[in-house]
């Protein structure tokens, strides 16, 4: 049976890809078609789908900065949107009930509130998948959207705990000791190498130390995987660990989207209710945009984040399932929610594939904030009169900064992703700003780069330097660009993409080491004569 499902998913995903749609649209359609022929989800498929979601949340955690959640725009925005959307959805459902719409006529007010609450959530899995496919997981709007989704996951844990009456075990307090294990977990990661042990260690952290441990103490397993990922996010190999899981996770997520279509058999009442819910979806998008606008984000950030979150969540099915078991909601709602979630995915996927075009058109009509009033995390970037730009202010970038400053004086600006490093550099009187060159929004926010004549790509991650080079080429930068590379294939790729100079840091370190030895020790060795 599973072989048939895999074959159908491949065929539908391939067709969707050829139609320039995200493959997940094909996976959803495959599930619906199979369901219409009487096929249903299997325990094996459901298990694989759950594993895919768990690994996805773990990899999200590996890339998530905890400081993002502490921003008032994130936790405050998520809370405000959840309360407003629940209230407004409930109000509309009450109006439909008063109008005598059959499917809502017999529902009590508390049932309508539950439905409104379920509709307020957006899908973490779907949103992250879209951001990954667009390569904009690190974009400003992407980090804002992820922060909102993580807060919604926390709300989900609170709801499930309160509604089920199940209080986490007293042993759950021991989870606060997890940060104390971080040095040990880091040491193991240091020794895990770069092959299959690294992948196995990542799976063990996600499924055992994260999901398994949280489930044992009565907490939401997926939240455990997310938090374990966040615990490991500060390690230099966190990005490599996430990449090692990529293909494995993607394969399992196929099962997740296929499983949604296979989960419920459509009924006439369910279809009608789902269509009503879809008519309410634009309200959700309007509320998201209003909240982001209230936080003074740029129009681009607000609109793209809204489109990323413009869907219903599979969590609505969980809410419905819990409420159904408690006798609070009819079974019709489960069918309607399953259909509405799937339809929202089918609608949101093509909208997000055209998101930048939609923004270009909408920007002509939407008023932008005055630059001085923009959110501090979304302000425009001005390089001033600097002639040299260094992207990545680690040890290599810092050394390059000091050497170039000795040569050309105070006309250099550095860009660093870590806030604490930015403060340290400024304390050492270097001109360094906070920014991420792998974030497409970084380049969108740059308003003055016409003085820049030389750019040094000094980020330790090879793909990051290659990505930054692509951004510069796309913007027709006319100056010189140089980059560091750890591996020969990175160096080759940089040259293929038109870099002016690429330097292998290991070769350069060896040459520099030899020069310093000769300068300091001055060995009395007679050079060999060559014929």
Image: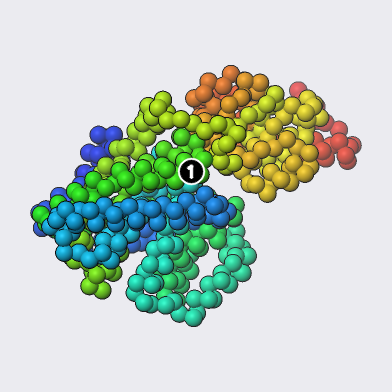
Q: Quadrant of residue 100?
A: bottom left
Q: Is 517 left, or right, of 472 in this rendering? A: right
Q: Is 78 left, or right, of 178 in this rendering? A: left
The x and y percentages for residue 164 are: 34, 74
Q: 355 or 36: which is nearer to us?
A: 355
The x and y percentages for residue 26 are: 24, 44
Q: In this view, does 492 lie above or below 177?
A: above
Q: In this view, does 274 lie above or below 464?
A: below
At 40% from the left edge and 56% from the top edge, which residue is drawn?
83
Q: In this view, does 452 lie above or below 225?
A: above
Q: 3 or 152: which is nearer to us?
A: 152
The x and y percentages for residue 352 are: 35, 38
**Could you tell me which quadrant the N terminus lies in?**
bottom left
Q: Is 363 left, or right, of 524 in this rendering? A: left
Q: Is residue 222 visible?
A: no
Q: In which quarter of the image is residue 50?
A: bottom left
At 45% from the left edge and 39% from the top edge, which residue is drawn?
302
At 49% from the left edge and 76% from the top edge, which residue is drawn?
172
Give the residue number, with chain letter if any, for mark 1: 294
Q: Is mark 1 on a helix, strand or loop?
A: helix
């Amino acid at each position: 049976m599973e072989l048939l499902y895999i074959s159908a998913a491949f065929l539908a995903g391939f067709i969707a890809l050829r139609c320039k749609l995200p493959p997940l649209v094909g996976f959803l359609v495959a599930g619906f078609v199979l369901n219409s022929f009487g096929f249903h989800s299997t325990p094996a498929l459901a298990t694989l789908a759950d594993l895919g979601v768990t690994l996805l949340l773990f990899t999200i955690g590996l890339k998530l900065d905890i400081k993002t959640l502490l921003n008032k725009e994130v936790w405050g925005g998520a809370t405000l949107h959840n309360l407003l959307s629940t209230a407004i959805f409930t109000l509309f459902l009450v109006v439909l009930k008063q109008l005598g719409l059959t499917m809502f006529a017999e529902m009590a007010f508390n049932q309508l509130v539950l439905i409104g609450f379920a509709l307020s959530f957006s899908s973490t899995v779907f949103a992250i998948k879209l951001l990954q496919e667009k390569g904009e997981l690190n974009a400003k709007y992407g980090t804002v959207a992820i922060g909102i989704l993580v807060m919604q996951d926390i709300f989900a844990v609170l709801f499930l705990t309160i509604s089920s009456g199940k209080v986490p075990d007293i042993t759950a307090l021991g989870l606060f000791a997890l940060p104390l294990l971080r040095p040990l977990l880091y040491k193991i990661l240091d020794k895990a190498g770069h092959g299959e042990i690294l992948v196995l260690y990542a799976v063990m952290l996600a499924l055992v130390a994260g999901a398994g441990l949280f489930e044992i103490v009565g907490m939401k397993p997926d939240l455990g995987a997310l938090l374990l990922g966040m615990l490991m996010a500060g390690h230099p190999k966190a990005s490599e660990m996430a990449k090692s899981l990529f293909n494995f996770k993607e394969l399992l997520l196929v099962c997740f989207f296929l499983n949604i279509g296979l989960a419920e058999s459509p009924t006439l009442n369910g279809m009608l209710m789902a269509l009503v819910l879809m008519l309410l979806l634009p309200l959700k998008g309007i509320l998201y945009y209003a909240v982001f606008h209230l936080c003074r984000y740029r129009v681009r950030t607000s609109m793209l984040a809204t489109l990323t979150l413009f869907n219903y969540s599979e969590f609505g099915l969980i809410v419905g399932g819990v409420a159904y078991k408690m006798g609070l909601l009819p079974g019709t709602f489960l069918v309607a929610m399953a259909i509405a979630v799937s339809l929202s995915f089918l609608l949101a996927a093509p909208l997000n594939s055209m998101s930048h075009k939609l923004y270009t058109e909408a920007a002509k009509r939407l008023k932008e904030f005055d630059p001085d009033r923009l959110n501090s995390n979304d302000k425009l970037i001005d390089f001033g009169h600097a002639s040299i730009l260094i992207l990545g202010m680690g040890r290599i970038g810092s050394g390059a900064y000091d050497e170039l400053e000795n040569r050309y004086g105070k006309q250099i600006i550095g860009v660093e992703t870590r806030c604490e490093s930015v403060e340290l550099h400024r304390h050492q009187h270097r001109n360094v700003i906070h920014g991420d060159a792998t974030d497409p929004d970084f380049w969108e926010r740059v308003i003055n780069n016409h003085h820049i004549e030389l750019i040094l790509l000094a980020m330790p991650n090879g793909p990051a330097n290659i990505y930054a080079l692509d951004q510069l080429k796309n913007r027709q930068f006319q100056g010189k660009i140089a980059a560091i590379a750890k591996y020969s294939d990175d160096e080759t790729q940089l040259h293929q993409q038109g870099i002016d100079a690429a330097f292998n840091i290991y070769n350069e370190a060896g040459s520099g080491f030899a020069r310093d030895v000769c300068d300091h020790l001055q060995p009395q060795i007679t050079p060999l004569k060559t014929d």
